[in-house]
Amino acid sequence: VKNDINKIDPLSLVASELGGITDNISRILETGNPTLSKVARHYFQATGKQIRPLVVLLMSQVVNGLALESHSTSQITSDFAFIDRSVPENLDSDKESMIRDSIIRLALSQSLNKDLYNPTINMNNNVILPTQRRLAEITELIHTASLVHDDIIDGSDTRRGIPTSHQVFGNKMSVLAGDFLLARASVSLARLRNPEVVELLATVIMDLVEGEFKQLKNINSDGSNLQYSDLNAPNEDSFKYYIQKTYLKTSSLFAKSLRASAVLGNASDEYVEMAYIFGRNLGTAFQVHSFNFTFTIKMALVDDLLDFTSSQKQTGKPVGADLNLGIATAPVLYAWQEFPELGVLIKRKFSEINDPQTALLLVQKSQGIAKTRQLIQSYAERAMAALSLFPPSPSRQALLQLTHSLIYRTK
Ligand code: FPP
Ligand code: MG
Ligand code: MG
């Protein structure tokens, strides 16, 4: 992957749209009960990265540009004749994943790099439909609802640099505020008057809950606990389980909301599919990357390179939280391939006092971080391959850059 891509500031393309979204979210959280509104608005006073609305808005511009330019889709349509136009209920089945693999292969064979890094830029694709703007808001509402509940489950003290909702308002009001955010998102969703989009985003909510459950209880769909069957090394199931959990917890929202933005933009089935594939791979690269980042900070901490408070300030998260909760993530799973003794720690969810520190030191000695970087790169490249099948435009360039930055960014 080349490093010299044309620089576009992704934020600059949709900055005012993003500002409008924050304002509108605050407006629609108005209720007859000022306390409920206050609790529901808590996380919106500290602006997060808004990465989900950002990519939804950019993808909206990409697909709307297609319609505006009446870009010739005939070649694309014949290339994708093998796509089964069934309703997206089977999005995650094996058959669908074979189709996705064929699309990625096709993209790669059409020479990913040909026009990807030096596009003739079409400046006419800045249209965002009102429904797509609402969709961007809905993604942020659903995401924030899940964070309010997640912080209660994890017992986290800070989020986005401010005290968590339950720290300020207590568990009871916070659970209800999370429910309210989800309910408010559902009303907005229904108002889009598009059943396919309603189904997509409703499925995202199911996926979030299932992903969180998967993390809570390391159980396969058949009730077994195969991924830790041999404590000396991870098996294929350990990685499969981790990637599946990551899909449910993070990539599903990216994938299905980007798919929805293409549906709302009346894009052809092929482009709808590509928007989904792009989102699915970007979401996974994004999640693995952000965890890898917090993980490296924790490792530095073990070395006393950073003190507790500065690390907590940088990440806005309590240090060691993930490890203490016993989640075996990519760096740990890779380290386990080299250090069999990690198996026991993983199985008991790092529950003994020195476990997190021991695990961090072993990961540090291993190829865990380097291999996780390769994993991120492979997902980012698949995302870029899907993106390369859209015609060039500033918004496509911005999405490309955003994806590309996950490979090289060290923070
Ligand atoms: C953050 O993960 C949490 C999520 C991405 C999803 C949490 C989902 C639920 C709590 C299910 C309920 C869902 C809804 C829609 C109300 P993390 O704890 O690994 O990351 P963090 O460090 O950001 O807390
Ligand atoms: Mg958490
Ligand atoms: Mg959590």
Image (cartoon, helix red, strand yellow):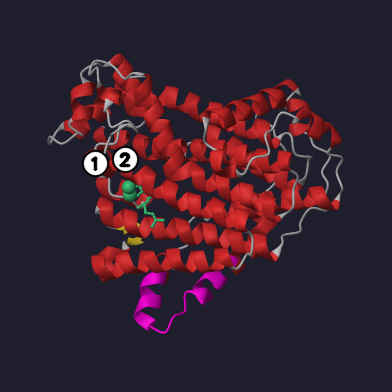
Three-letter amino acid code of the residue under disc 1: Leu
Horizontal placement of 145 versus 308: left or right? Answer: right
Q: Is residue 24 above or below residue 79?
A: below
Q: Find the magenta span and give its range.
A: 21-40
Residue at 63% x, 28% y is 99
The 10 Å Cα crowd at callout 1, few under 14, some 14 to 19, many 20 or more, is: some
Q: Position of residue 14 (x, y in %)?
A: 67, 58
What is the secondary structure assignment of the residue under circle 1?
loop
Q: Which mark lies nearer to you, 1 or 2?
A: 2
- Mark 2, ligand 3, within 8 Å: the answer is yes
Horizontal placement of 68 versus 284: left or right? Answer: right
Given contact means CB atoms under 8 Å apart, are the residues at marks 1 and 2 in contact? yes
Horizontal placement of 386 versus 203: left or right? Answer: right
Number of numbered discs present?
2
Residue at 67% x, 30% y is 385
Q: Position of residue 17 (x, y in %)?
A: 65, 63
- Point out the tag, 1 or 2, that comes first from the N-terminus: 2
- Residue at which label 2 appears: 215
Q: How far apart, in angstroms, are the residues tagged by discs 1 and 2?
A: 9 Å
- Mark 1, ligand 3, within 8 Å: the answer is yes
Q: Is residue 39 magenta?
A: yes
Quadrant in the picture for the N terminus: top right
Residue at 28% x, 37% y is 301
What is the secondary structure assignment of the residue under circle 2?
helix
- In the picture as drawn, the residue positioned furthest to the left comes out as 353
- Residue at which label 1 appears: 325
Nearer to me, 305 or 105:
105
Q: Is residue 48 above or below residue 86?
A: below
Three-letter amino acid code of the residue under disc 2: Gln
